[in-house]
Image (cartoon, helix red, strand yellow):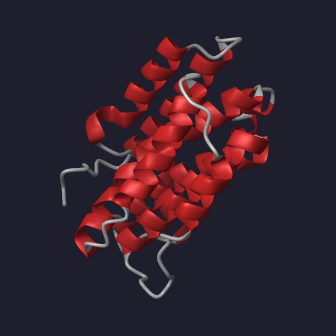
Amino acid sequence: MYFDELYAPLREMQDWQQTAFSAALCERIFPHYVLYDSLRETNNVEVARTALDQVWKQLSLRGNMNAETQLTKVEAIVHGEEDESFGAGLAFDALVALMATLHCIDNASFEDAASVAHLSRESVAKFVELHADEEMGDEELIRHISTHDLMAQELAFQNDVMQLLVSQNVAKASQIDQLKTMSMGDGVSNIGISMTDG
């Protein structure tokens, strides 16, 4: 019920607003993939970075991207599920969020934007759970996650992005740039991971 209310504005947004919302949250969890790629030394981060930058350019009316081409490139760098580490899971979610964001370029939907929101929330939930007391019961753990400062910050950020976007009837380059800067957070993710940690 709470999330239905929280994301009510997202359901009513225009296509470009849903895409911008997705891009903002994707940007916020992008450091998770950067760190994973750096540690594995696979050197695929530029593929993902280029795709996300193309989304921002499209939104700010500075470019006209081929989303399908970028989607194919990102799909090619998604790592297999054999790596079950915490970092691999976060990186995988970041790429899935990016693919959903790319899908929004040609066919924006509430479902895709909401899935990116879910992935971003889940990264926080997984991090909080990882550092929680192992003695916690299920209900206590759920309460601990939902009331944690990092989750409160995540939900506040998502709400701030939605409010910023619904205040704009048309996409303006200056406001898209503002949103991108806000989302990048000096290269620090929603769980405090920095792009320079690797």
Q: Is residue 155 visible?
A: no
Which image quarter holds the N terminus?
A: top right
Which residue is at 60% across, 34% downward?
21
Which residue is at 47% across, 76% downward?
79
| Residue 139 in the image: above or below residue 153 | below
Numbered circles on residues, count: 0
Percent position (x, y) of residue 129?
A: 42, 64
Which image quarter holds the C terminus?
A: bottom left
Q: Is residue 71 left or right of residue 47?
A: right
Q: Quadrant of residue 45?
A: bottom left
Percent position (x, y) of residue 96?
A: 57, 60
Which residue is at 50% across, 48% downward?
51
Q: Is residue 133 visible?
A: yes
Q: Nearer the viewer, residue 138 or 73?
A: 73
| Residue 123 in the image: above or below residue 16 | below
Which residue is at 55% across, 38% downward?
55
Percent position (x, y) of residue 81?
A: 51, 83
Q: Quadrant of residue 42?
A: bottom left
Percent position (x, y) of residue 40?
A: 28, 75
